[in-house]
Image: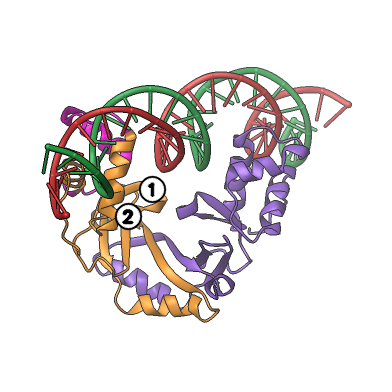
Chain colours: A purple, B orange, C green, D red
Amino acid sequence: MTARKLTRNQQLVLDRLADSSAALTAYDLLDRLRDEGLRAPVQVYRALEALGQQGLVHRIESLNAFVACCGHDPHAAAGFAICDNCGEVTEFAFPASEEGLKSLAGAKGFETRRMTVELHGRCATCAER
Amino acid sequence: MTARKLTRNQQLVLDRLADSSAALTAYDLLDRLRDEGLRAPVQVYRALEALGQQGLVHRIESLNAFVACCGHDPHAAAGFAICDNCGEVTEFAFPASEEGLKSLAGAKGFETRRMTVELHGRCATCAER
DNA sequence: TCACGAACGTTATATCATTACGTCCTTAAT
DNA sequence: ATTAAGGACGTAATGATATAACGTTCGTGA
């Protein structure tokens, strides 16, 4: 069920995200796809939603922006390390700690359906200076 | 340094957040403060920024909304359990796992300055049905 | 009392996201 | 082949969130 054929718009959006090391906003994507005939934000948002449902794209909440997902288990929780200097976003999987987090909230009866973990700071390159 | 006297607008905003179990957007706050004389979004945003710097308020990135912070160490990382049914947001501190997360990203040289952890799901009450 | 910085209020505008509506294309049953 | 249904599309309008620019007022300390 994870492998549906993508529509043209979905493929265009995914390709642009995959080409970028930084997260792109919907309007960034729209600008980069004008030459392909896209005109309106909703076209991008529709593609992003479909891609998100297939686990191919993640939304970075703290940036109102999106990244291509580097193909872990789509249902695994993902964390994102975001360099506030150069914009580079690197995704990392969540092995041990995810359950720890869930149970932390779960102890009070909370049922976790979606978790967002975002680290902001400086990537290795930008931290050097 | 954590205890600065609050301005009138800051106190008004903080009070409204403290009264609410759900996160409130800046515009929610503005609506609730019209009677107090507030007119423009920027007034609310300015108060929110100042309160955030003092660790009295947190932004919930995935909701574009804000909550009063329940007085842990302001520099400790906080996680938020957000009930998508009733909107209740409960904050929890991050004991062990924070360092684990930081080092996960840190292993690749990432220097973490801010981390956001948001759990979406159902609170105990809403999970029962 | 006056100089300075912080906070303020007002207006305008930028940025992010969705609703509404009608059309076209695919697909599968007939 | 025909057609009904659903999905994706394009266009237009609007809603929701956030900031910029500007001049004024307020509080504090010299």
* For discs 2 and 1, the disc positioned in front in the rendered view: 1
The residue identified by callout 2 is B82
Q: Image point 38% across, 48% down: which residue? A: B63
Residue D25 vs A66, above or below: the answer is: above
Residue A27 vs B38, above or below: the answer is: below
Image position of B100 (left or right of B125): right
Q: Position of residue A7 (x, y in %)?
A: 72, 45
Q: Does the stretch in magenta take in B20?
A: yes
Residue A86 vs D24, above or below: the answer is: below
Q: Nearer the viewer, residue A38 or B129?
A: A38
Q: Is residue A77 visible?
A: no
- Tell me which chain the residue with mark 2 is part of: B
Q: Nearer the viewer, residue A43 or C14?
A: C14
The residue identified by callout 1 is B63
Q: Is residue B77 visible?
A: yes
Q: Image point 45% across, 63% down: which residue? A: A118
Q: Which residues are magenta?
A: B18-40
Mark 1: amino acid: Leu
- Determine crowd level at label 2: few under 14, some 14-19, many 20+ residues with C-alpha closer than 10 A: many
Lower sequence index among marks 2 and 1: 1
Q: Are marks 2 and 1 in contact (CB under 8 Å)?
A: yes
